[in-house]
Image: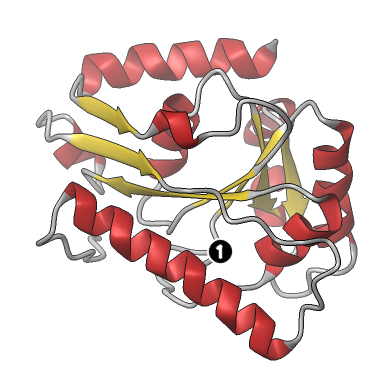
Amino acid sequence: MFFRTLRSIVRFLLLLLNGNAHYQNREKLPKEGTFILVAPHRTWIDPLYLVLAASPHEFAFMAKKELFKNPILGWIIRHAHAFPVDRENPGPSAIKTPVKILKQGHLNLGIFPTGTRHSSELKGGAITIAKLSGVPIVPAVYQGPLTLAKLVTRKRVTVRFGDPIVIDRNTKLSKDKLKEIEGQMQQAFDQLDHEIDPSYTYKIEP
């Protein structure tokens, strides 16, 4: 209930601030069962739009443990299905917790495989979680404003979903296999970016 209420508030605020959002290929989202939504992390804004674009699906998100130290922010994100992860020393819970969430069948999982917006290196956590939980990975990209100042100029926002990537539960995740699937994910991101805007290039803004 809290997640849906918060999502409605965010939708209203973003409509006021921007009002120029476009969600493409929503039919790619699985109609049954849970899934992992993956996207390159480009701005603090993209998690908000990804959740709105994938509505009515609800999501759990990994969040760095430091965010939970703030009592108010920690309470909000915990009730919005976020769970803490130690980025420096992830530990087994970084895999076990999301696998348990997905197997329960109520929440999907949102992951940014690059970890932060300052990185373009994919990490294999989403792949391992997908294999252990038996759910597909759905790639998505966000193109749009990267700062609040640009958001309020009503610059176009686009979220586009790609074809699900299915990982057989019997697949052995060797280094070569991980690289192969990571390549599929990156190729999906590149293709989605090209389909939205062939000239698009991501540039980090302060």
Say how many tags the image has: 1
Q: Residue beneath label 1, please?
A: 113
Please give the name of the residue rendered at 15% of the width and 34% of the height, measured from the top-left corner. Answer: 156
Q: Amino acid at mark 1?
A: Pro
Describe residue 22's horizontal placement relative to residue 137 as left or right.
Answer: left
At a point 87% along the width and 39% down the height, the residue shown is 103
Which quadrant of the figure has residue 80? top right
Q: Nearer the viewer, residue 49 or 116?
A: 49
Give the image quarter of residue 60: top right
Q: Is residue 47 left or right of residue 145?
A: right
The answer to whether 110 is drawn above or below residue 113 in the figure is above
Nearest the viewer among 9 and 112 is 112
Q: Position of residue 164 (x, y in %)?
A: 55, 49
Q: Is residue 16 above or below residue 34?
A: above
Crowding around mark 1 (Cα neighbors within 10 Å: few <14, some 14 to 19, many 20+) is: many
Measured from the top left, where is residue 114 in percent x and y?
51, 67
